[in-house]
Image (cartoon, rainbow, N blue to C red):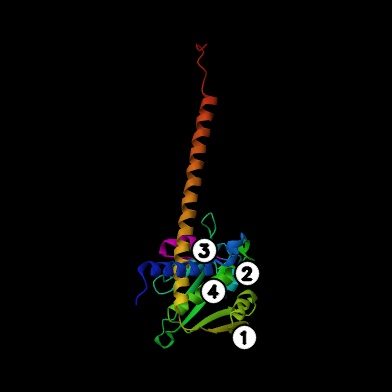
Amino acid sequence: MNAPQSVKHQHTRSWWRDALLRLMGSATLTRERPSWIPIRKLSPRHRIKILQHLVRLAPQDRYLRFGYPANDEQIGRYVEGLNFVRDEIYGVFNRRLELVAMAHLAFSIDPQWSTCAEFGVSVLLQSRSKGLGGRLFDHAVVHARNEGVHMLFIHALSENSAMLNIARHAGARVERDGSESEAYLLLPAATLDSRVNQIVNEKMSEVDYQLKTTAQQFRGLLQVMQEIRQGVRDARHHAPRDPDAP
């Protein structure tokens, strides 16, 4: 006998609620700092923000991210060459809609390596020590699994201890070859839980981004209104007085 429709709906709501709580983390329920971080998928309209993010990296950080001391022109070519259809590019925005961290999950274009992908990440100096790099890596793992990727690569300089530690913590095998290192992480097959995790995270991150956008627009409107009011006050203060006025 089939379950009543109301019972089915209740079970579905409960299942989505449990998935949401797993994503948010139990700390949300105890008024502690929530473990969830809004990671939003980026699109071609975010190229300017991506460029602004990357050129703000210090020379050493550029060296660690790209493997060479990339200048502004080289970074610009990298940004222009991003393929938002084939690859997954995502980031974390602060409340001022500044891109403070971003990651690039690049899928192989070689048919022989169709189940492989490579991960790269960058975090601005003022936003470090918050675990953003690790969160972006976890996000990449989930998305890669759901896309049928079996092996995730991380190519990094051996001195990039932060990135290699993230890989090791996830269980990756790290091989060092002089000044460069390769990390290999075997990924399990996608599950219903991994797919739900991705869907819920994307929906919540979109809501978070729209709220930040609305807040920024409201702050801009307030600033314009304050400038208008100040202009009116200044005009009154400097207006010539009518000598015939009482």
Residue at mark 3 = 38
Separation of residues labelled 2 and 3 (CA atoms): 27 Å
Q: Is residue 77 visible?
A: no
Q: What residue type is labelled 3?
A: Pro
| Residue numbers of the magenta segment | 36-49
1 or 2: tag closer to the N-terminus: 2
Q: Name the residue under label 2.
A: 60
Q: Measuring from the top left, give residue 101's x and y in whole percent.
A: 55, 65
Task: Tell whether label 2 touches label 4 (CB within 8 Å).
Answer: no
Distance between the alpha carbons at the discs numbered 1 and 4:
23 Å
Answer few, some or many: residues within 10 Å of disc 1's Cα (few below 14, many 20 plus, some between 14 and 19): few
Residue type pointed to by label 2: Gln
Sequence-wise first label, 2 or 3 = 3
Residue count near mark 4 (Cα–Cα under 10 Å), binned few <14, some 14–19, many ≥20: some
**Element at label 2:** helix
Q: Are marks 1 and 4 in contact (CB under 8 Å)?
A: no
Q: Which-is-in-front pick, marks 2 and 3?
A: 3
**First in sequence: mark 3 vs mark 1:** 3
In contact (CB < 8 Å): disc 3 and disc 1: no
Residue sitting nearer the eye, 92 or 233: 92
Q: Residue furthest front?
A: 1
| Of the image marks 4 and 2, the number of the one nearer the N terminus | 2
| Residue 138: numbered disc | 4
- Counting labels gives 4
Horizontally, is 104 left or right of 169 in the view?
left
Residue tagged 1: 176
Q: Vertically, is 65 above or below 116?
A: above
Q: Is mark 4 on a helix, strand or loop?
A: helix
Residue 33 shown left or right of residue 50 in the figure = right
